[in-house]
Amino acid sequence: MSSRTLAAALVVFTVGCHRQAPAPPVDAALEALRTEEQTAGLNYAEGQGKQLFDQYCATCHGDGGKGDGQNASNLNPTVPDLTTSKNLADATYVRRVIAEGSAAVGRSPLSPPWGRSLSPQEVAYVTLYCQALAKKKP
Amino acid sequence: MASPRFPRTRAWLDETARSVWRIGWPRTDKDRAAVMISSFFLHLPPARVSRHVLRPSYTLGLGLISAILFGVLTVTGLALMLYYVPHPPEAYRSVMDLQSVVTFGVILRNMHRWSAHAMVFVVFLHLCRVFWTGSYKRPREFNWVVGVVLLLLTLALSFTGYLLPWDQLAFWAITVGTNIAAYAPVVGDQVKFLLLGGHVIGPMTLLRFYVLHCVFLPLAVAVLISVHVWRVRKDGLSGAPEGSKPVEETAGVFPPSTKTWGLMALTRRPTVSVEARDPEDEVFAWPHLLYRELLVALGVVIALHVVSLLFMAPLEEMADPTRTPNPAKAPWYFLGLQELVHYSAFVGGVLVPTLIVVALLALPYVDRHPRGVGRWFAPERRVANAIFTAVVAVATVLTIIGTLFRGPNWAWTWPW
Amino acid sequence: MRDPQTAPPRLHLAFAALGLGFLAIFSWVFFKEQGAEWRSAQARFRKLEATVKNPHQLAQSAGAAGVRQVWLPDLDRVDRCTTCHLGVDDPAFAKAPALFRSHPGTWLTTHPVERFGCTVCHDGQGEATDYAHAAHKPIPGVARAMRPLETIEANCGACHRSLEPRGAPRLAEGRRLIVESGCVACHDIPGFEGVSFRGPGLDSLGYKVRPDWLEGWLKDPKGYLANSKMGNFRLSEAEIAGLRALLLSQKAEAPQVADVDWKKADSANGKALFGQLRCVSCHAVNGRGGTMGPELSRIGDKVRRDWLFSYLRDPHREQPDTAMLQYRLTDTQVRDVAAFLLEEYKTPGGEAEAAPAPYQDAPAVAEGRAVFVRRGCYGCHKLAGIRETGKIGPSLAGVADRDPDQLPYGGKPVRRTADNYIFLKVQQPDSLGAPSLMPTFSFAPAQAAKITLALASLHKADLPASRVVKEAPPTPYRPRGAFGELVTRYRCLSCHRIGGSGGDLSTVPLDRIGSQLQHDYLVAYLLNPGAVRVSVEARMPVFHMLPEEARTIADYAATTFLDDDLDRYDTRFTPAEVSRGEQLYRQLGCVGCHQLNLQGGYVGPDLSNTGQRLRPGWTAAWLAAPNRYKPGTLQPDYGLSPGDARALTAYLASLGGSTSRAAGKAASATGGGHP
């Protein structure tokens, strides 16, 4: 047998006998939750904030914070578009508006104070979500 | 020679030292002999040894290494006893605490574990060496028997210690081991009951194993090691000088290789008991033998430290009798048996172990052929060597299979 | 050759070398111990301390030296995490590197480290003092590695046993899905003992459904009803044939037909009634509406006309356990509604219904009975003559602690953990290698993951009672007498809660409704429920109640559903208070959510007639602390002083009717509002 045949046989033998490396094991439930988060584009805290926002804020501010909620047309002054507002860069400002109401920062009283209805943890979550809304590309 | 300074201080120091060590640092031949004979600790080895005994290539120092390992195990074991609690679940917690909290706890535990594994392995190698050099033959038959008993005691020590961490690895290894013991006919279940202190492995088992591991077995081993070394001294080292003819056995009560020294070490006149070898061939144990033994001890301890620093002793989660790992494996030295048990419970659990132990114990009384003592693989002993080597090879292969090539449900797996 | 007195030089060399080696090794041992992970972490922390402002507000990590541990004997845990995580409970370290950073959120305020340790929430091996052995990442031989944050709510559930734990939304969603999907019908689940789940009774199914519909339903319930609670049982053709024979032969009671002329049925009237009866509050059509009852989009394919007529007339005759109320309608009205439903909501081009044929196929019926028992249908559906043999699924107690090595994973590339097993089983019960009786529920992966979280909190070991947080289940409320009959007929408790038990469709619990609403208003409202809040879809239906029924209910409320604190309120308001209240109304921006005289928002109720509607004691209490009466309400808590709340109440009480009349009525009801 020629040496080339031998070499070829050796290669085939080595490659053929090498087992396929198994795929790395996953945690299925974890992956499902992560996919859900990624689809929403929000991390855990922001996701919590979104749930609270939908419950308390979306009626006026709209589902995406654009100021197009069900109740928005009844309000004067109008509801600002959170996604383009410059004020949202300041987390302290946002937290004040949420917890103490828009009247506390010198604006109209139409955005009520939620500081006694939400725990500080929940206020923090909503703040993060609002800031995420402002950062998102439309 | 000028007189030394501070003569009175020196004299006082000298006398104080002599009150402890009756013979001072030996500088004369008389002292070199006396220090060995009159010391409590040093009178076990002989005062003079053949030069050829110092050659490591004959015995490979395996017996010495086993004894050193036993010493390391005793010291580390006593230290571990300060922290270990022999009652589940505190047993597991205390081992966990040793690893996590106790200063130097990790190295202490690792040293103990790796010395234990090393001792089983080295004792096994020592047995092989003694066989292959034919050193079990007359007059050393009984010493071989003592050695086999020591091997069994070493395995017992390792086995009882294996359970003590009370983690999944320990618990199920001992489950497998005691189940193999239970295969013995007639007495199997009683033996298992005796070992376990009940029907299941529980707190009684742990306490029993602990007492065996820390009290009974070490005492037995210490006593038997002393007997073993004493017989070595009395029967003489079997290693013949290089190139010389094998010693002919002469008729008589005491074979020519017996050496008794006592006071006779101080004279150079041969007596009836002294063999025809050149007495100049012998040197004093102090310093030649003891110095070499010290170097071996240093080497062994350094090696153990290196291994202990690099490799962690395993600790899985706490033992859970309701969760069996798959596969559950006995300690490595029983894996060959477990592999056999997989084929046949009787063969692996009863037949083979019994045959091996009986064969080992009976060996020197069956093989009385006097030839071939003192050399490795002597041609006169071709058949015996071949049989023994074959058995050892099979045992090694079976152990390797059990360790590396068996996965869940004891199915064949490739370890890569 | 003479005996050499001294050892040869090579031995001395070896001694020197080994001696040096010995010293080197001992130094290595010593420095390894000194350089242990936790020691170097503490050294780095001490350097960090010097750079941080006002550290150790809580004085926990001050002077950190040595191993630090939290011992929790009642939980049998020792946690040494704070040996390295030194800044975890100190807000001063909020911006520190990850190892020393203070814990995010306010979790440590509610769960202080001294009482809870760390591994209760995060899992991992708390006794270890180095990164690897603490199981920050999974290590072989250790079952509980640290949980990633996404699934951490499974550990919340170990202590927090209520069905809707606040602060753990994924867990709450998972538990909600378990309740809604009816898992308790087949499985015993700890923590869900008070939950019951029944499907409709099948004793007269032969009269109720069309046979072709039944086959389609048994094959795939979701084909008919997208949000069906019944899973797909993956039945074989033979099993479907057997069940079909069994169920269509169930004719316990024929529907009650009246003497109506179906040819004169007026669908337009039916449609108007459909809107008035507010059916969509509970039954969705074309994707919009409530989910308490089944969706009606294709009801015409399913039910027979006579049965539908009988059911709409008196639902409690056909299905005694139904949540649906019995309207007070005439037979022609019922006819019109039925005709509308059957015409409007069906697959176009379907066959006309045939008379129910008698089913005599005894072997098929027997086979169907066997299938009914074998697949555990009786867990949800009562059927006469079926021998129930207990819940057909295994108990889920301790499911999180099942031995992961003994569980099947169907060859999927997942890590062998109980969590993964639960997830795979919930998603695809029959894909794990062995045939399964469990139906397929078609959960979205995220939903299945949340159910897994809820089930992963069910551990074998019991927690000490001091650690468990759960509410006592409410005692069921069963009123008696004339009022009780009305509650049963009109199924108030399907939507409202009294004493904690009831439904959640309405956000108005009725426990103190007598102190909230004025009597006459309540009577008028029951006779003609209008929209209190315009933006809400689910509304109270028009019951077509009789006036004396409305009065019975309002009288009972006014004498029983009271809150004495509210009734003691002094309702003698001064004009100064009213004008201050008006000022506050403008100041606080109430117009944003409330209508007043046709101006304002649509979030809260219209306030134009508050003077006739609400009792002032309630208004004041509500304004002062809305979350106390309705947690999660959209009414903000402005932190009003009692004086301000009183002023606003005075203003609102003056709206929409004479204040004195309202005050007089209130006074007479409570015998003079004394302070």
Image: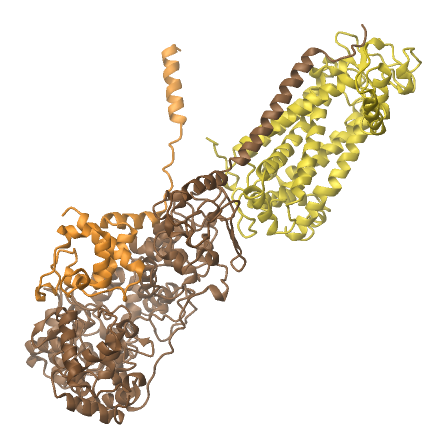
Chain colours: A orange, B yellow, C brown
Residue C447 spot, x, y in % from top left: 30, 56
Residue B212 sits in which quadrant? top right
> Which residue is nearer to you in this view: C49 or A118?
C49
Q: Residue furthest right?
A: B272
**Residue positioned 84% across, 12% down in the render:** B248
Residue B384 appearing in the image: no
Q: Position of residue C41 (x, y in %)?
A: 46, 40
Question: Looking at the image, which is closer to me, C573 or A112?
Answer: C573
In this rendering, would C203 be left or right of C541?
A: right
Q: x, y percentage for residue C49? A: 42, 44
Q: Position of residue C532 (x, y in %)?
A: 16, 77
Q: With C306 as the anchor, is B117 left or right in this view? A: right
* Residue C155 position by quadrant: bottom left
Q: In this orientation, which residue lies closer to the viewer: C184 or A108?
A: A108
Please indicate whether residue B230 sits to the left or right of residue B114 in the image.
Answer: right
Question: Does the rendering let one see residue B154?
Answer: yes
Instruction: Give me the residue at 87% from left, 12% from top.
Output: B275
- Where is C612 relative to C433, above or below? below
Given residues C338 and B61, the one toward you in this image is B61
Quarter-of-image position of residue C537:
bottom left
